[in-house]
Image (cartoon, rainbow, N blue to C red):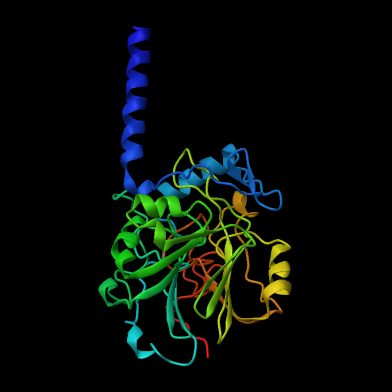
Amino acid sequence: MKKTLLFSLMGLAAVTGTVLTQYKPLGQKPKALRSSNLVNGKFRNQLDTPMRFSSDDMISMSKEYLNPDSLRKPSERLPVVPIDFSEKLGSSFTHIYWLGHSAMLVQMDGKTMLVDPMFGRSPSPLPFAKNERFSEDLPFELDDLPDIDVVLLTHDHYDHLDYATIQAIKDKVAVFIVPLGVGSHLKRWGVGAERIVERDWGEMYELGPWTFVCTPARHFSGRSLTDRNATLWASWVVIGETDRLFFSGDGGYGPHFKEIGDAYGPFDFAALECGQMTSAGRTCICNRVRRHRRSVTSGPTRCSRFTGARSRYRSTPGSTRPNRWSACCRARMCSHR
């Protein structure tokens, strides 16, 4: 009886493993990476960055996720205003559209860039996941996106890298610029290696009038139970002829912000993630936006699209003031200059 049960469990595990390895939304774990930031096959932060989940945390999280009266979502779908990207194309000014959560579209120096495009309904590999975006529709049709010179990715979490989105836009994209190892997912999804540029912290890539610098972040990565920290996470500096931009990606606060500002600033615009976190994750998600003296304009991101943590959508029932860690703003577009 025990042997039969054991063999049954082993067979189930083998079948499950086979299914998961064939399930494309999970991506693909990279192999044979070389980096000074790798230790025993896993990337590490510059600072010790523990993620501690106690039993009380797990019980509390489970209750909140199962609570039908949870205040972690807006009471109604958020409205969106349609965007006509062609209006600004070719302008001599830099235009930056915030598209919800961490997704942004930048038009600068005659080029177009998407940052962390996640246009799916839910940041999950499971089609039946209930954590749907707060708006019914996108403020644009994917077919109406202009040709994209660059897709810039900060890390491989589902709320930043979405399989369905990549499938929808990949034929419009000239090049994907990503942290080390993230290209493995894109290759699995049909993006040619010749269109993928991977960089480690401190490395650069030049594309026409733009220089991309892969800079540190304090976070983690992974898309399954077996690939935690197998790919690098990063922030990015983009130096153009018109402006200097900084995209923080997800990450906790640390001295790297000042170091990046000293080395590559001052910035004309900085996109800083600002919330949706648990108490156990304070070291890998910033709990506030700090306007850095080396940035002229800053915009909060990682909000107003999905429920990403236990923090409430609004600070108190009926309040019109968003919680500082969740839906920090309802606007769907910002433009610089």
In front: 290, or 111? 111
In front: 62, or 28? 28
Horizontal side, residue 45 vs residue 317: left or right: right
Please determine whether, in this image, residue 21 is positioned above or below residue 84: above
Please determine whether, in this image, residue 42 is positioned above or below residue 154: above
**Which quarter shows the N terminus?**
top left
Horizontal side, residue 264 vs residue 109: left or right: right
x 32%, y 17%: residue:
8
Q: How many marks?
A: 0
Q: Outermost residue toward the bottom? A: 92
x 73%, y 63%: residue:
255
In front: 40, or 300? 40
Please determine whether, in this image, residue 163 is positioned above or below residue 260: above
Q: Is residue 166 visible?
A: yes
Q: Position of residue 132 (x, y in %)?
A: 35, 59
x 48%, y 85%: residue:
109
Please determine whether, in this image, residue 80 is positioned above or below residue 197: below
Query: Quadrant of the rendered structure where residue 40 is?
Result: top right
Q: Is residue 100 visible?
A: no
Q: Outermost residue toward the top? A: 1
Q: Position of residue 290 (x, y in %)?
A: 66, 72
x 38%, y 70%: residue:
174
Q: Position of residue 278 (x, y in %)?
A: 57, 53
Q: Position of residue 25 (x, y in %)?
A: 35, 49
